[in-house]
Image (spheres, rainbow, N blue to C red):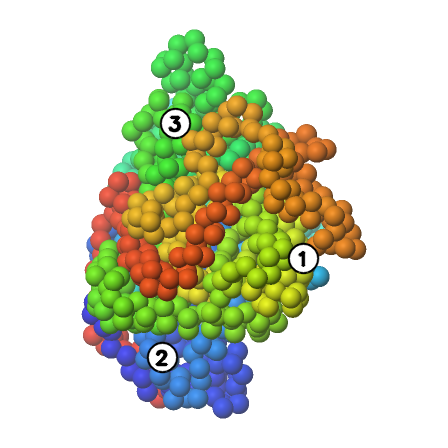
């Protein structure tokens, strides 16, 4: 990896100059926040030449471009990551020290770019990092939400949602590009005009329109001068001045368009794996998709003649069904604006589009009422009707007389537009995100589609970027790894297997665990500052951080903590290795049971943490506002990673991989990518428990199981469950946790009881936790397994995932970007002179 030259004095002068021009102050007088903005601008200066050079290379080489279309990009903070990928991090740290500043403190001033909920959005962010690092031309296409994922406050144990005003001080890395604005039209009706040749033209009339303005964020590749673009669209009213135009009679229209523009990009929907079905959400989808597809076509036409070959230079990857309207929008533009015949347009569209499935859970599948769809997007809906008509004919040809197939597979059926069916019919690739997930898609959820078009189905096991989650998040371990095997792991994580030879080396084990200890001290300090709870870094740090969802089973975890506490109380002298159970999770604002689970965790924490009689053997911490920036600290400090979803429900998981990379041992079910992790590290180096996916699916197909049998036969479980309704953790309101109790035992509601098999898996989970305790007591054995986990994590780099997408789906060309000679230093010379 060639190291770019860095002019430290120039960078320092640039920071001092920026503080002066931005804030009319000196570096000594400036606040940390002001210094952050000055450093970010100096960093942007360093990025901009490579950003321009990348665009120049794209002009020259004309590579195929992937447009990664996603409603969510969970980017986190940019400054530290940009410095890491510029390979300037250590030098900038040193430069700032010479100015009397601490880079860590400065990084902490930056708000997270939280334009996503959880795994799906973070995957998109990791993919952009890998695409740039591998030298592929890529655009991330998304929405510039005015408010991102809400900030979480815990008040009296309850989650409170605070708007995430992340743009209040501006975004120093953002470049607004009004010259590339696009117009997006909603509503109205379709007029048909027949020309002299008898050809029909479809014209949308009486619509509302907004202007989509691209805002570009740089995506820096690691040490290779490649800078790709995350293009997020802002919305503006078409004609603000018309607000004064009473006399023109379009005042009403102007006000409505103004409101629409503001509302469209106002806020990210905070639902993970759940479809709320709100009209505004569909508008958001069409807004950013229409703008992105228009721009992709405009870019192509700047230097290509034949739109029929568009797919040779562009690939659209649809991150879940949220961007699926892209297939109809592409058809619309090709037919209505580019004049292609249906079959020509269809060939271009299918060769361009590919779909990634992220879940098999019914409540997450997107279906829109015909009424809503056709009212909001009349022309797009016509096109989907025609796609459906032809698709149904295909089904009939393949399965003559089989009405059942049509009922199950049609794109439009029973008054609804089924977005997954549209994505499958109109794309050339359908991929799941872990092997088990893809197999379940093929055998269960999408079986009919797989039987009809098996060639479209493929697996792309998710990955994570080691640049953010090891090199940046865990600098001590990163340095240690580099000291032992060199630094090639940074861009080729398969190299990390070279650490395997150190697994039995006692010195290496000690160093490894010493680094873990220092990271635990760092997290303990964070917890002390943010929660006011003192935790012992010598205790086992057992961590579950992820979105709060019933299928992820935080309830199983906290019930087990309650069980352990009962044991300690019953047997005060029993052997017990001190443990700290750490939770972090946001619940969707309208998800009552999830929010009640947060309250339960905090109530249990209150009782346990304040019980002096247990001598601090057990602590429970709920970390407020779990997000990418504090995630980096958390993964580095974990001994145990909780990946305990009901088998078959977690499509892949990526948190599991971040823990493994950082040397935590997994307690988990055979679900999602856990299966492949265990394959890499060996079953003896993980703690696997519970029902298999096949067993869960089998129970589900036979009406579930009866949790009362367990309640009646297992005293410990009964004890814990009774504590949910006898006020043990809520003396002032014993009924507080009744709904959680009912969800497990179904005493007075009509849902099936314990849908997520929590009680069914409880014993197996508790026994496995007991094994964790005994292995941890053997320091060498634990150290060996922890080190081994890190050494086996090579497969789970998003670099590997992206290379598979490139080879099997996108077929992109690699770019090499070199900077013109005079631009190879950090600029700012002009500024500093
Ligand atoms: C990785 C990550 C996730 C996904 O975690 P899972 O355990 O795979 O659900 C969610 N949120 C943040 C902030 C992450 O970094």
Please say if the residues under marks 2 and 1 sit with CB atoms less than 8 Å apart. Answer: no
In which quadrant of the rendered image does the N terminus lie?
bottom left
Is residue 134 or residue 721 the one in the foreground? 721
Residue depth check, mark 2 versus mark 1: number of the one nearer the observer: 1
The answer to whether 214 appears left or right of 239 in the picture is left
Instruction: Return the residue at label 2.
Output: 92
Label 3 CB sits under 8 Å from any ligand 1 atom? no
Q: Residue at x 33, y 58 (%)?
A: 785
Instruction: Return the residue at label 1.
Output: 603
Name which of mark 1 and mark 3 comes first in the sequence: 3
Q: Residue at x 27, y 68 (%)?
A: 506
Q: Position of residue 56 (x, y in %)?
A: 26, 61
Instruction: Return the residue at label 3.
Output: 443
Q: Position of residue 763 (x, y in %)?
A: 52, 42
Residue depth check, mark 1 versus mark 3: number of the one nearer the observer: 1
Q: Residue at x 48, y 32 (%)?
A: 696
Q: Is the residue 381 above or below the residue 394 in the image? A: below
Label 2 and label 1: CA atoms lie apart by 44 Å
Is residue 160 or residue 738 the one in the foreground? 738
Label 1 and label 3: CA atoms lie apart by 42 Å
């Amino acid at each position: 990896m060639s190291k770019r030259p860095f002019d430290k004095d120039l960078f320092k002068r640039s920071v001092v100059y920026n503080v002066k021009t931005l804030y009319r102050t000196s570096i000594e007088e400036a606040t940390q926040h002001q210094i952050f903005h000055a450093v970010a601008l100096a960093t942007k200066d360093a990025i901009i030449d490579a950003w321009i050079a990348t665009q120049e290379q794209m002009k020259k080489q004309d590579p195929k471009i992937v447009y990664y279309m996603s409603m969510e990009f969970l980017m986190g903070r940019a400054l530290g990551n940009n410095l890491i990928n510029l390979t300037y991090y250590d030098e900038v740290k040193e430069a700032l020290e010479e100015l009397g500043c601490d880079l860590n403190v400065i990084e902490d001033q930056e708000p997270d770019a939280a334009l996503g909920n959880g795994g799906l959005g973070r995957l998109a962010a990791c993919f952009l990092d890998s695409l740039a690092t591998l030298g592929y031309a890529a655009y991330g296409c998304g929405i510039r939400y005015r408010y991102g994922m809400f900030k979480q406050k815990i008040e009296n144990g309850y989650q409170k949602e605070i708007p995430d005003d992340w743009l209040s001080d501006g975004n120093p890395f953002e470049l607004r590009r009004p010259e590339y604005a696009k117009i997006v039209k909603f509503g109205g009706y379709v007029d048909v005009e027949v020309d002299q040749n008898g050809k029909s033209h479809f014209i949308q009339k009486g619509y509302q329109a907004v202007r989509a303005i691209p805002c570009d964020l740089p995506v820096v590749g690691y040490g290779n001068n490649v800078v790709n673009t995350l293009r997020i669209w802002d919305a503006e009213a078409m004609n603000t001045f018309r607000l004064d135009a009473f006399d023109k009679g379009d005042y009403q229209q102007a006000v409505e368009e103004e409101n629409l523009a503001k509302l469209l990009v106002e806020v990210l929907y905070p639902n993970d794996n759940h479809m709320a079905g709100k009209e505004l959400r569909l508008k958001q989808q069409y807004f950013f998709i229409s703008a992105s597809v228009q721009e992709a076509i405009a870019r192509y036409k700047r230097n290509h003649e034949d739109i029929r070959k568009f797919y040779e230079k562009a690939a659209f990857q649809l991150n879940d069904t949220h961007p699926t309207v892209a297939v109809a929008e592409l058809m619309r533009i090709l037919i209505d604006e580019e004049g292609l015949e249906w079959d020509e347009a269809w060939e271009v569209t299918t060769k361009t589009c590919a779909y990634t499935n992220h879940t098999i859970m019914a409540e997450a599948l997107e279906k829109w009422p015909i009424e809503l769809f056709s009212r909001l997007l009349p022309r797009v809906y016509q096109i989907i009707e025609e796609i459906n008509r032809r698709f149904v004919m295909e089904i009939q040809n393949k399965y003559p007389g089989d009405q059942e197939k049509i009922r199950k597979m049609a794109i439009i059926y029973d008054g609804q537009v089924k977005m997954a069916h549209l994505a499958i019919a109109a794309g050339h690739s359908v991929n799941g995100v872990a092997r088990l997930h893809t197999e379940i898609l093929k055998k269960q959820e999408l079986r009919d589609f797989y039987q009809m078009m098996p060639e479209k189905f493929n697996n792309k096991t998710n990955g994570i970027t080691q640049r953010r989650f090891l090199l940046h998040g865990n600098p001590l371990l990163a340095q240690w790894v580099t000291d032992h095997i060199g630094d090639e792991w940074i861009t080729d994580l398969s190299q990390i297997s070279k650490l395997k030879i150190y697994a039995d080396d006692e010195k290496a084990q000690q160093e490894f665990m010493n680094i873990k200890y220092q990271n635990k001290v760092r997290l303990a300090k964070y917890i002390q500052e943010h929660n006011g709870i003192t935790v012992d870094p010598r205790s086992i740090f057992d961590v579950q951080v992820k979105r709060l969802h019933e299928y992820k089973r935080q309830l199983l975890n906290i019930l087990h903590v309650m069980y352990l506490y009962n044991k300690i109380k019953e047997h005060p002298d029993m052997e017990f290795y001190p443990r700290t159970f750490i939770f972090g999770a946001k619940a969707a604002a309208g998800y009552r049971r999830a929010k009640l689970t947060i309250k339960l965790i905090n109530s249990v924490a209150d009782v346990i943490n304040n019980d002096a009689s247990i001598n601090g053997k057990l602590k429970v911490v709920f970390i407020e506002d779990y997000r990418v920036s504090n995630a980096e600290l958390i993964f580095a400090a974990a001994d145990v990673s909780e990946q305990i979803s009901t088998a078959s429900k977690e499509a892949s998981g990526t948190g599991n991989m971040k823990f493994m990379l950082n040397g935590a041992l997994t307690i988990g079910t055979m679900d999602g990518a856990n299966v492949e992790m265990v394959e890499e590290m060996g079953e003896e180096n993980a703690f696997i428990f519970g029902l298999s996916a096949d067993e869960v699916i089998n129970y589900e197909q036979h009406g579930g199981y009866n949790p009362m049998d367990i309640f009646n036969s297992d005293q410990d479980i009964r004890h814990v469950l009774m504590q949910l309704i006898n006020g043990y953790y809520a003396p002032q309101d014993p009924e507080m946790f009744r709904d959680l109790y009912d969800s497990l035992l179904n005493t007075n509601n009509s849902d099936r009881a314990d849908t997520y098999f929590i009680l069914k898996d409880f014993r197996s989970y508790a026994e496995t936790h007991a094994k964790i305790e005994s292995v941890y007591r053997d320091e060498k054995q634990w150290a060996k397994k922890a080190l081994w986990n890190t050494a086996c994590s090579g497969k789970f780099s998003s670099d590997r995932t992206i290379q598979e997408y490139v080879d099997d789906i996108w077929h992109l060309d690699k770019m090499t970007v070199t900077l013109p000679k005079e631009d190879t230093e950090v600029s700012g010379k002009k500024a500093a002179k």
